[in-house]
Image (tube, rainbow, N blue to C red):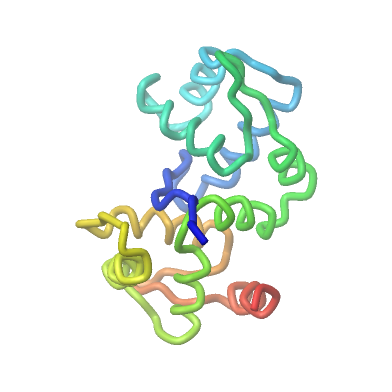
Amino acid sequence: MTDNRRMSTDPFYGGTTNRIKNLRGFLSYLRDGPISRSAVKDWIISNTTARSRDAVDPNISFLAAIELIKINDDQVSLSRRGTQYLNDSKPEILYQALQSNVKGFNTILRELEQNPMTDADIRDLLVKSFPETEMTTARGAAHHREWLQVLGYIKRSDGVNTLTGTGHDLLAKTN
């Protein structure tokens, strides 16, 4: 069976501190959509740390790839999953959006259940687990880790990532 999920993630604005707040604000903005792509870019630049209209494109495309939003021609709207996350805000909804469209999230959590890992360790795990992966630095792995971190499934201290109790609970539900 072919796994057609993508390998890479893109962050959303706000780092690990404000990403979820910014994402929820953005999804709320789309609630009455569809909204033009130009207006979406203006909103993101006005409400986050984004500074370049061109730099916003990968973030918008990533949110469409994980099925939180829909892009049709030049219009952006909230998807069914985006609406569900906005209404419920359970981390599991966003996690499901990520893991069903991007490789590696379950793999990382299962390994963290056994051992703490640095971002470089996560990169090595992803490269080993997914031979098509072309991660030459830990940056891509850090993007995966940041999503898991903002969802509360892992914590990071002194460059080392460990599974939280919530992360253990998620694994117990998915195994």
Going 52% across and 68% down the picture, which residue do you hit? 106
Residue 66 vertical position relative to residue 51 in the rendered view, above or below: below
The quarter holding residue 114 reads: bottom left
Viewer-proximal residue among 59 and 52: 59
Residue 145 vertical position relative to residue 62 in the rendered view, above or below: below
Going 57% across and 64% down the picture, which residue do you hit? 152
Q: Residue furthest right?
A: 87
Going 72% across and 50% down the picture, which residue do you hit? 89
Viewer-proximal residue among 91 and 96: 96
The quarter holding residue 74 reads: top right
166 vs 124, left or right, is right
Q: Position of residue 73 (x, y in %)?
A: 56, 15
Q: Where is residue 62 in the image (x, y as percent from the top left)?
A: 49, 38
Q: Residue furthest left?
A: 136
160 vs 60, left or right, is left
Going 78% across and 49% down the picture, which residue do you hit? 88
13 vs 137, left or right, is right
Viewer-proximal residue among 133 and 24: 133
Image quarter (top left, top right, bottom left or bottom right) of the C terminus: bottom right
Q: Which residue lies furthest to the bottom in this view?
A: 114
Q: Position of residue 54 (x, y in %)?
A: 36, 21
Residue 109 vertical position relative to residue 76 in the rendered view, above or below: below
Q: Position of residue 37 (x, y in %)?
A: 54, 16
